[in-house]
Image: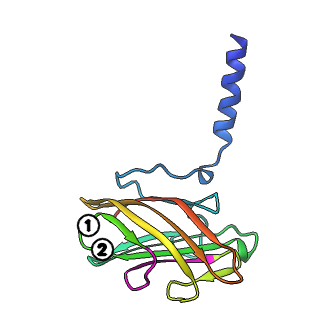
């Protein structure tokens, strides 16, 4: 009995000591307004503020779907990261879309001492965005991408997920 209490106490401490920002949001399709991914194996979620601007925004105008987000850690400018992703998307369209073509869908990343601009031809992009739900005012999906650029660290974004109301 005493051992069970000790084990329960240890697991409770571990569970409660985890910060919300250290865990990826669940991959849902309910309009929970969540967003996150692994950046080179570490959890990345929007955080911090720059003036009155929200650290996470999504937009759909009937033709283009985009997401922009940032994370301000505050230790130094190289700790701050910004992302922007967009695709051309018809209403209620679901499926897999390439993030390799700035004309139809792409991904930009600023951080870790480099800028991987969406229209920069020296940035190599290999990635996909999967829309799994797009109806009733909800858009949800997953994404992954690898960005490479000479003289910059390779950016591996995996287990990306979002679940948004629009």
Q: In which quarter of the image is the N terminus?
A: top right
Q: Residue 89 carries which label?
A: 2
Label 1: which secondary element: loop
Is residue 36 at least partly visible in the picture? Answer: yes
Q: Quadrant of the C terminus?
A: bottom left
Query: How many residues crowd mark 1 within 10 Å: few (<14), some (14–19), many (20+)?
Result: few
Whether 104 is among the magenta residues is yes
Residue at x 44%, y 84% (from the top left corner): 102
Q: Which mark is residue 40?
A: none
Q: In this view, does 92 lie above or below 78?
A: above
Q: Residue 93 carries which label?
A: 1
Residue at x 75%, y 74% (from the top left corner): 76
Q: Position of residue 163 (x, y in %)?
A: 40, 58
Q: Where is residue 55 in the image (x, y as percent from the top left)?
A: 53, 69
Q: Where is residue 128 in the image (x, y as percent from the top left)?
A: 44, 68
Label 2: which secondary element: loop
Seen as rendered, the residue at the extreme top is 1
**Viewer-nearest residue: 108 or 69:** 108
Is residue 53 at least partly visible in the picture? Answer: no
Q: Is residue 5 above or below residue 78?
A: above
Q: Is residue 60 above or below residue 94?
A: below
Q: In this view, does 87 lie to the left or right of 127?
A: left
Whether 161 is among the magenta residues is no
What is the distance, in whole Å, between disc 2 and disc 1 at their CAs? 7 Å
Residue 6 position by quadrant? top right
Residue span colored magenta: 99-110
Query: How many residues crowd mark 2 within 10 Å: few (<14), some (14–19), many (20+)?
Result: some
Q: Are marks 2 and 1 in contact (CB under 8 Å)?
A: yes
Residue at x 71%, y 29% (from the top left corner): 10
């Amino acid at each position: 009995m005493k051992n069970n209490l000790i084990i329960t106490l240890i697991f409770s401490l571990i569970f409660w000591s985890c910060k919300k920002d250290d865990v990826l949001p669940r991959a849902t399709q309910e309009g929970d307004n969540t967003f996150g991914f692994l950046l080179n194996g570490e959890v990345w979620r929007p955080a911090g503020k720059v003036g009155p601007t929200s650290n996470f925004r999504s937009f759909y105008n009937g033709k283009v779907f985009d997401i922009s987000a940032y994370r301000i850690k505050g230790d130094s400018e190289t700790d701050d990261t910004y992302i922007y992703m967009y695709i051309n998307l018809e209403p209620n369209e679901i499926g897999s879309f390439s993030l390799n073509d700035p004309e139809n869908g792409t991904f930009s990343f600023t951080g870790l001492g480099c800028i991987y601009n969406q229209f920069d031809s020296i940035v190599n992009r290999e990635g996909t965005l999967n829309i799994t739900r797009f109806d009733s005012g909800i858009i949800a999906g997953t994404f992954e991408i690898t960005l490479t650029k000479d003289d910059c660290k390779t950016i591996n974004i995996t287990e990306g997920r979002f679940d948004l109301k629009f």
